Image (cartoon, rainbow, N blue to C red):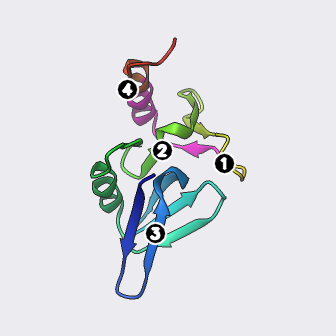
Amino acid sequence: MEWLKISTSTELVRVATDEVVFVRADGNYSDLVLTNGKIRKLTFQIHFFEEAFQRLRANTFVRVGRSLIVNRRYIHVINLTEQSLELTGQEIKADMPLIRASREALKQLKEALEQEKGAES
């Protein structure tokens, strides 16, 4: 298990990466959404998280458009028509809302997941 460590001048937040469902940009802040449904607002822009996830040995995170990073382990349905992303998984203990994203960003995500090795049709 890998840990995401986020340090500010006043606190240190440690989160197991498999507990992170997604990160959504909110201006100069980001919302870190966990499998237990908790949302932690942090004073970092989304590119901070993108760079942190890229340093992981097993990076399961994918950027979806300008304002969203999703843990691909929890992607259940990509719906281009509704421009939504449904996230589910055994580890998720809370109802996750449908996530809205641009059609183009979702199309790129869908194509990338279709090309992944080891996936069944």
Instruction: Where is residue 38? Give x, y as percent.
Output: 63, 64
Which callout, 3 or 1, points to the residue nearer the camera? 3
- Label 4 SS: helix
Q: Check disc 3 and give the amino acid type.
A: Arg
Which callout, 4 or 1, points to the residue nearer the camera? 1
Q: On the image, numbered disc 3 is attached to which residue?
A: 14
Task: Give the Cα separation between the discs numbered 4 and 2.
Answer: 14 Å
Task: Give the Cα separation between the discs numbered 4 and 3.
Answer: 29 Å
- Could you tell me if residue 64 is visible in this image? no
Instruction: Where is residue 70? Give x, y as percent.
Output: 47, 45
Residue 83 or 70: which is nearer the viewer?
Answer: 70
Report the magenta residues as a range. 98-110
Outermost residue, top direction? 121
Q: Earlier in the sequence, mark 4 or mark 2?
A: 2
Q: Check disc 2 and give the amino acid type.
A: Asn
Residue 72 or 47: which is nearer the viewer?
Answer: 72
Callout 3 touching callout 1 (CB < 8 Å): no
Q: On the image, numbered disc 2 is attached to which residue?
A: 71
Q: Is residue 69 positioned above or below 107 on the image?
A: below
- Label 3 SS: strand
- Could you tell me if residue 103 is visible in this image? yes
Task: Give the Cα separation between the discs numbered 2 and 1.
Answer: 12 Å
Q: Is residue 121 positioned above or below 54 on the image?
A: above
Q: Check disc 1 and give the amino acid type.
A: Ile
Left or right: 79 in relation to 109:
right
Q: Earlier in the sequence, mark 3 or mark 1?
A: 3
Q: Which residue is found at the position 55% from the left and 44% from the top? A: 100
Q: On the image, numbered disc 4 is attached to which residue?
A: 112
Task: Give the Cα separation between the discs numbered 3 and 1.
Answer: 18 Å
